[in-house]
Amino acid sequence: MIPSIDKTIQVLEELSRCEPRQVRCTGVENKARVIANWCLGLSGLFLIIMACFVFLYDTRPPSIYAQIFVLMMSIISMLLAMSTLIAPIVASILLAFRWKKLSLEGLCDDIRHEQAMADRLAKFESVALKDAHFWLSRKVRRISERTGRFFGEKTAAIGLLATAYSFAAEFGGFEWISRTLVAGFRIDNLGNTVLLGVGALLLGMSIGSIALGHIAARYRYQIEIIELVGRE
């Protein structure tokens, strides 16, 4: 029995509102972010104070106290700037000791989130759900075949990016690119222009492969939600 296409589209519209659970920061991570932001702000403040002092101080040669003041402001500013990088690292180290608890909590939250989305789909007929599953699987297969024509399904984007980078590096890197762009489309520069166009095409293909992979991943996630509804 072929279901009404309108019912299938209704399922797909409901699935389009299904998003993966956003991972919330833990209390330790929030505190680390607050500390890092404060350190960054204070570092900038001390740097501004030091710059204003140096700009307004007109005694030559500067006194020993002025030199000590500037040195202290500089050291404090650098230490605070380093703290903005250290705080998240310390938070990650602390969380590493709680990985079992955090992984369990994340798993439970994922189950609740995805089961809630599956419950919203339970109101649709099983025939419509199967038809939506069919069309999503078909779309994923087409995307995979499209991106896999070049270097294989798993390495298409990476291979194209590497090819584009190697292509540009082989012909002189960014300096060659800038010279070719400045020269423009002229007869004596036709070869370089064509080569640059080929490199841009490779880069565009790699970016397109990444975008298509993101779309395919979204469709796979929607397929998984449908499979939750039909599980026994």
Image (tube, helix red, strand yellow):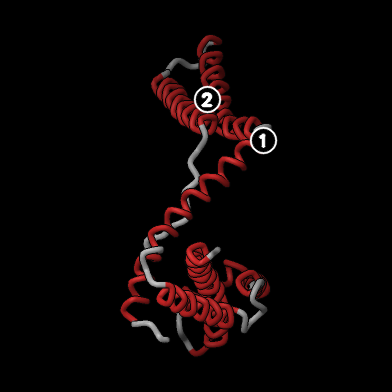
Q: Position of residue 143 (x, y in %)?
A: 53, 78
Q: Position of residue 31 (x, y in %)?
A: 50, 28
Q: Residue furthest front?
A: 232
Q: Position of residue 60 (x, y in %)?
A: 48, 17
Question: Callout 1, which amino acid?
Answer: Ala
- Residue 155 placement, left or right of 195: right
Q: Position of residue 40 (x, y in %)?
A: 48, 30
Which residue is the site of mark 1?
A: 96
Give the label on residue 77, or none: 2
Q: Residue at x 66, y 38 (%)?
A: 100
Instruction: Name the quadrant containing residue 163.
Output: bottom right
Q: Are marks 2 and 1 in contact (CB under 8 Å)?
A: no
Disc 1 crowd rating (10 Å Cα; few below 14, some 14-19, many 20+) is few
Give the label on residue 158, or none: none
Q: Residue at x 54, y 74 (%)?
A: 209
Q: Residue at x 43, y 77 (%)?
A: 127
Q: Residue furthest bottom?
A: 187
Instruction: Name the quadrant containing residue 68.
Output: top right
Q: Is residue 194 visible?
A: yes
Q: Is residue 214 visible?
A: no
In the foreground, 132 or 157: 132
Q: Secondary structure at mark 1?
A: helix
- Looking at the picture, does residue 116 appear above or below residue 141? above
Distance in Å between CA atoms under marks 2 and 1: 30 Å
**Image quadrant in which the C terminus is located:** bottom right
- Looking at the picture, does residue 21 appear above or below residue 102? below
